[in-house]
Image (cartoon, grey):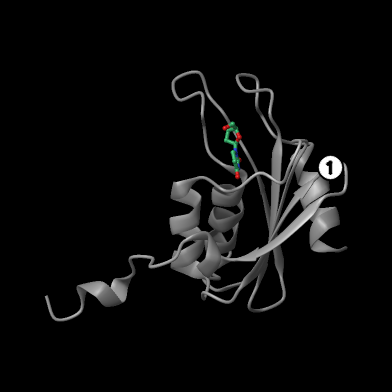
Amino acid sequence: MTLRDAAIAVRENAHAPYSNFKVGAAIRAASGTVYVGCNVENVAYPEGTCAEAGAIAAMCAAGEYEIAEVYVIAASPSPVPPCGGCRQKLAEFGKSAVPVTLATTAGAELATSIGALLPGAFGAGHMEGS
Ligand code: THU
């Protein structure tokens, strides 16, 4: 199964009763295993948890901490960019050059990278020597 197919499939499981905007994310980890996530909203925090954060959580829960590739899909007019918090999370677990594809269910794709999504990211290295 391709990352795109995995992201399309998990998007169907999104719980988005407040935004009615379903998002699917698939991450290939360094081992080659694919982890998926969908957005999950709740009444207290209607913005809920993003699909990317869900896929990252699944990866970590399986004991993996290195992202090799990312695919995100939604039924939006143009490929939806990850929110700021998700950009930071992606930067925490993936190198700058890691490819990220943002896609629409209609077939549009935007190829970018973790570094391009969050230039100058704050990282653990910035706390060295403090
Ligand atoms: N959302 C994601 O899951 N990923 C993105 O990249 C953009 C936004 C979700 C969060 C919320 O459930 C809904 O889309 C509307 O913001």
Give the quarter of the image for residue 92: bottom left
Coordinates of residue 78 in the picture (x, y in percent): 73, 42
Q: Is residue 105 left or right of residue 101?
A: right
The quarter of the rendering in which ligand 1 is drawn is top right
Coordinates of residue 30 in the picture (x, y in percent): 63, 78
User: Which residue, given by chain and number where applicable, does mark 1 sit on?
Assistant: 105
Vertically, is 126 above or below 48? Answer: below
Disc 1, ligand 1: is the CB inside 8 Å?
A: no
Residue situated in front as seen by the camera: 121 or 61: 121
Vertically, is 88 above or below 76? Answer: below
Question: Looking at the figure, which quarter contains the N terminus?
Answer: bottom right
Q: Is residue 45 left or right of residue 116?
A: left
Question: Looking at the figure, which quarter contains the C terminus?
Answer: bottom left
Q: Is residue 127 left or right of residue 59?
A: left
Residue situated in front as seen by the camera: 120 or 128: 120
Residue occupying image coordinates x 72% and y 76%: 32
Vertically, is 83 above or below 110? Answer: above
Residue situated in front as seen by the camera: 122 or 45: 122
Residue occupying image coordinates x 49% and y 55%: 87
Coordinates of residue 111 in the picture (x, y in percent): 71, 63
Label 1 sits on what residue type? Thr
Give the quarter of the image for residue 39: top right
Residue occupying image coordinates x 68% and y 29%: 21
Secondary element at tag 1: loop
